[in-house]
Image (cartoon, helix red, strand yellow):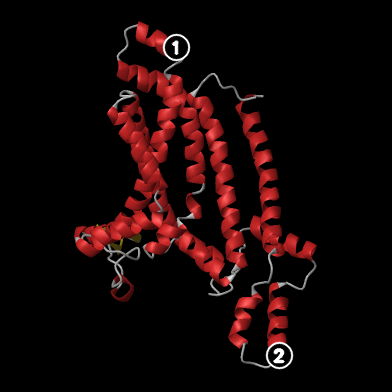
Amino acid sequence: MGLRGFILKRVINSFIILLLVILANYAIFMLMPGDPTDFLMAAWSKESPEARKEHERILKEMWGLNDPPLVQFFKYLRNLLTWNFGVEIAGRRPIGQVMVTKVQYTVLVLGLSTIISIVIGVILGIAVIQRRGSVVDSVAVIGSLIVGSLPTFWLGLIFLWVFCGTLKWFPGARAFPAEWAIVGYPKPYTANLGFSSNTMQVGLTLDLRQTLELVGGYASHLFLPLLTLTVFSFGGWLLLTRATMLEAITEDYIVTARAKGLDERTVLYKHAFKNASLPIITSAALAFGFVLSGAIITETVFSYPGIGGWIWEAISYRDYPVLMAVFYVISLCVIVANIIADLLYGVVDPRIKYG
């Protein structure tokens, strides 16, 4: 079938899966007890029953909740496929615009922590394999299990207490200094427009001090949530790498490589790890696919304005349009990540054929 046929087949299968996910997403929220009007009706709790019923009727008519379920589903399907997510029930802001803002913060903290934890975990996992059965190996395994079992909110609170409360090295909340919301963000560059000989000239002037202030402000607020997620996650990658490497080093080709006189580093990194990396690629693809799901607990502890905190607010307010939009985007990212992982298999292991 070849690579093109494989990609086409995976895209078609993924589209079918996406439609099933959309159907499940719709059914879950539609079958839940109550509806979004319950939250807003609390604001009119002191009004007469007739006035409350009129408000409820207007809201349901405005949101199309009186339409038949099949009509509601096709409207929902059309809106999702055209990326028209509507507006928040509580905040009345366009969901798409809010999501773009939240995604930037979530990708920054969760994407960076995923990359760092994978790199650290894989390197340490290969390192302990060279000392398998030793005290170092035992400490690494036990330590990874313990750290990975700790609640993220507990880790976050400990880091807040140490680095924010005691040492006062880093701020403990928000994604940037609070005064920026009042005085404005630092401007790392200024644009200069000029005209000469009937031509327009555009120039940029870089302000190093403003640039350092901007980067430092974001980095200082990013450090603690990034540290929390990295410490919580890297142990799992260490254990996964160790397990796959333990299986790989018992294969015949590793014995042959050692018999040829290759040094242990070459055997482990060039031969064993290359074949042991397929499960790591799969797990990494899923991890990156779920980056947009956010880290609800960590973002809540550090008041970080990402997707996770937004999901928690939407759950609290029964903001179904937000939840349905976020779950749809997360599902789409996971599906795309799986396609990329399938393509990477053939790059890492040429024995895998597309077809």
What is the x, y in percent for residue 36? Answer: 64, 73
* Image quadrant in which you'd find residue 140: top left
Q: Quadrant of the C terminus?
A: top right
**Residue at the far bottom in the pictured view:** 48
Q: What residue is rendered at 56% in x and 22% in y?
A: 352
Figure check: 163 above or below 16: below
* Image quadrant in which you'd find residue 301: bottom left
Q: What residue is rendered at 46% in x and 15% in y?
A: 251
Residue 253 image label: 1
What is the x, y in percent for residue 189? Answer: 27, 61
Residue 119 image label: none
Q: What residue is rendered at 70% in x and 44% in y?
A: 16
Residue 78 in view, yes or no:
no
Residue 49 image label: 2
Residue 131 in view, yes or no:
yes
What is the x, y in percent for residue 148? Answer: 40, 45
Q: What residue is rendered at 66% in x and 50% in y?
A: 21
Q: Label 1: few (<14), some or many (≥20) within 10 Å?
A: some
In the depicted view, which residue is nearer to us: 147 or 95? 147
Q: Label 2: few (<14), some or many (≥20) within 10 Å?
A: few
Local SS, label 2: helix
Q: CA distance from mark 2 to mark 1?
A: 78 Å
In the depicted view, which residue is nearer to us: 230 or 270? 230
What is the x, y in percent for residue 166? Answer: 21, 62
Local SS, label 1: helix
Q: Earlier in the sequence, mark 2 or mark 1?
A: 2
